[in-house]
Each structure stands twice: as structure tokens, then as C-alpha cells.
Amino acid sequence: MAKNKRKNQILENITLVSAGAKGVAVGRTEEGKTVLVSGAVPGDVVNARVKKSKSKYFEAEIADLVEASPFRVLPRCIHFGVCGGCKWQNLSYEKQLEFKQDEVVNNILRIGGVDQFETQPILGAEKQYYYRNKMEFSFSDARWLTLDEVNSDAEIHDKNALGFHIPGMWSKILDLKECHLQEDPSNALRLAVKQYAVENNLDFFDVRNQEGFLRTMMLRQNSKGEWMVLFQLFREEKENREKLFAFLLENFPQIRTLLFAINPKGNDSIYDLEVQTYFGEGYLMEEMDGLKFKIGPKSFFQTNYAQALELYRKTLEFADLKGHEVVYDLYTGTGTIAQYVARNAKQVIGIESVQEAINAAEEHALLNGLDNCTFYCGDMKEVFTEEFLSQHPKADVLITDPPRDGMHQKVVEQILKLAPERIVYVSCNSATQARDIALMKEHYDVVKILPVDMFPQTHHVENIALLLRK
């Protein structure tokens, strides 16, 4: 039943039975129309306030929680529901894994059009909190205000913030009191920086007017407990900067390297900025099963170290290398997977579009004494061509780990022409992975899949699929 008020339409007693895309809970009206409810969990019965009405579904939020799901748990973070970062903190971890696995399987079945394959149980994370090795925070002189603060007549003085952007409100920053994604001293360091900045009258960034001093702060760590701190400053204030840095180094001995970049641009992207090293070597070293990687301020490296290691191990297992194979690694990034499998292969050829990533891949191969890795830079659909294939040995095994959009159709076509015996498809978006599989299913059988949970407390899930040539 629905109370039909144009600006406040309420759908009453909606039972939510499953999880949908982006972590919403899914139910139906009495008339059979789908309702997607944000902030709810499967098993809840809710009165849902409609935010958008589409022809086939409603987008809604909880107006009243009529009956709580048995799968509900108490969120750990005081900022839950506001920062938007960990939308499934209110859902038991066992159910998170169940719904993630269901999503992957349903995408392969429905979008991929494949119904005969082995589904291995999702690989859950041992650490469901404090698993990220990289976090980025923004400074703001106009923090997000609570509804009580907005409605209050009291004058608000503490407007500075160091934290996350509020979803859908680019100019508002949530002032973080705590975050459970990165281990100590992440919280202590962030809070100390804010307190020092306030006490010493350092200007927090004004996003709307593009002015201020302190702009962003990135915290990065390796598995040895060594830390990198990187500040983006809108303008140079040498004395203030050096005093802040001295304060940090004195109070946080875990900091192995301290860096900064002056950024007067209209965005916070660091990739076109000159990063300067104030303390340390400017990078951290990471090790994965004997392989060494140099992690700089601009390096891409999986943010969940423990699960990334499991993902690479499973990728190698799916590749089933005997030592004589030629392996192609598409979307190789900094060559992490390429080098992980290289010790078990005759030759590995990696392709990636970002030159800095290729430079890092070549540096890492040299560092690890791997002389059987060759890397090429360029747009995948323009590099991975028939001419390229004619100039290189035929691949026995192909590994692909594309971005969320999946592979370009031309790339899929080239894979089919290359016709490797075995394809290991690693994906952070099982929907686009399934779409690509559908293009290959006439020539390849999907033998097995393995979902991997890289981001507990969120709806995101990775998937590894093994395809064998028919």
C-alpha cells in the first residue's frame, strides 16, 4: 500500500528479500513493482520513502523500520550512514559474503548466459576492519553540519574539518572522529594533524573559493608497519610546513617518508604534480611471497594487502603454469600479477596504458631479477592488435585484469584470434566480466569462478574466472 503524496510518497510494509547493485536492499510492492531501499538490509520490513519513481522500480530510503532483519548488526563506526564509505556495516559479515557470492553467480548466469560452471566458496577476509593500507583525507574550512547544528540558533565556530567528502556534496567534508578502515596510528595521526593545524591557525582549504593552505593528506603503510605521509598544499608556506612536518616526525616515529606537493589546480589529482620529498627516501618497500615492490606516492598497489596476496595466489593457481608457457598479462598495471606468475612461466608479456605504471613494472622486474618479463605501454585496443600478435610468441595462458568497465570489444576480438588455451579473468566488476564472457562463450568454457572479498563492509567484490578453450 502507498500513501500517494507527491513529495512524500511512502510505500508501507515493504519486505526486503535480497541485496541489489551498490548495496541497496530489494523488495516489491503489492503490485509487484521493485523497490530499491538504501540504508536497509535484506530481511528488514520497512516503510520506504520514495526518492525517485521509475517505470520499473522505485528508489527509496527508510522512513520507518517496521521490523529489523535478523541479519542486522550494530555498526561499529559513529559516522555510519553519513560518510557513505562502509554501507554494509549494519549487515553481518556472513551475510555480506553470501550476497556478494550471489551477485557474482547471478551476473555470470544472467548476463554471461553461462549455466555450467563450478562456483568455489567466496574467499572472505580474515580482517573485516583495519584492512586498508592507503587512505586519503581532505581539509575543509566549511565542514558538513549535522541537522541539529543547522537548525540551532547557536553560532558555530569550529568549522574546520579533516575527513571524507559527503556523498553528493562535493564541497562538504565530514570531520572524522574515527575510522575503522586503516590500522593505528592512522586515526591518531589524522586527529593530531587537525589539532595542530587548528592550534597554530593554519588555513584549511576553501573548496568554493579555491584558497587556503592545507588541502589533502594521504596516509600509506606497508606490511612492516612503515608509513608514508603525503600532503597536498594549495600554496607554499615554508615555515608553517616545516613546523608541521617537524611536529609529525617527532610524535610519530612510524613515519618512514614524508612528502608534499603544491597544488593550485581545480582538482586534487596528484598524477600531474611534482611530489617533493621532505624526509626519507620518498617511497616504501613492500614484499609479497619473496617479490619486492617499490611503492611511491603515485603508485597503484592493492589497498588490501592480505587479500591481494590471496588473490594473486589464486590467480597463479588458476593459471596452472608448468614452466614452459608464454603468458600475456593484459591491463598489467605495475606488473604485480605479471611478476607473481613469472617465476612459473617461460615468458610474460604485460600491456598497460599508463607509462608511469610500465616504468614501475620494469623497475620491479629488475629489482626481482626477472628477465623473462617484457612490458608495453599504450591503449589496450590499439596496442593489442594483429600486428602485435604477429611480432610476439603465441600465448598459452592469458591473464586479464581490466578496470571496472571491462574489456573493449576489440580487445575481446583479439583474444579470440589469439586463442590461448587458458584465460584467467580477474575482475572488480562481475557484471562487465559476465558481459565479456558472453562474447567468448562460443569458443571458451567457463570452468570455475572464485569470488574474493577485497573490501569488507562494502558491496564491492572481486571475481576470478577460469576459461578453457573448447
Image (cartoon, grey):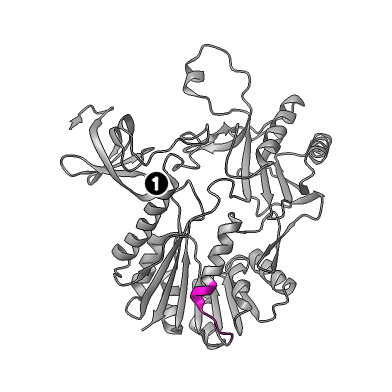
Q: Nearer the viewer, residue 251 or 219?
A: 251
Residue 115, how many percent across, how many down? 29, 69
Seen in the picture, residue 176 relative to 155 is either above or below; the reply is below
The image quadrant of residue 70 is top left
Q: Could you tell me if residue 358 is visible in this image? A: yes
Q: Residue 401 at what x, y percent from top left?
A: 51, 67
Q: Is residue 11 above or below residue 441?
A: above
Task: Write down the residue under mark 1.
Answer: 23
The magenta stretch is 316-323
Question: Where is 309 relative to 381, above or below?
Answer: above
Is residue 322 located in the magenta-colored stretch of the structure?
Answer: yes
x 63%, y 22%: residue:
158
Quarter of the image for the C terminus: give it: bottom left
Label 1 sits on what residue type? Gly
Which residue is more in the foreground, 39 or 279?
39
Is 276 part of what is drawn in magenta? no
* Residue at (60% x, 36% y) in the render: 163
Observer-nearest of 1 and 275: 1
- Callout 1 environment at 10 Å: few (<14), some (14 to 19), or many (20+)? many
x 69%, y 73%: residue? 365
Kindly identify the residue that appears in the image at 39 percent across and 37 percent down: 39
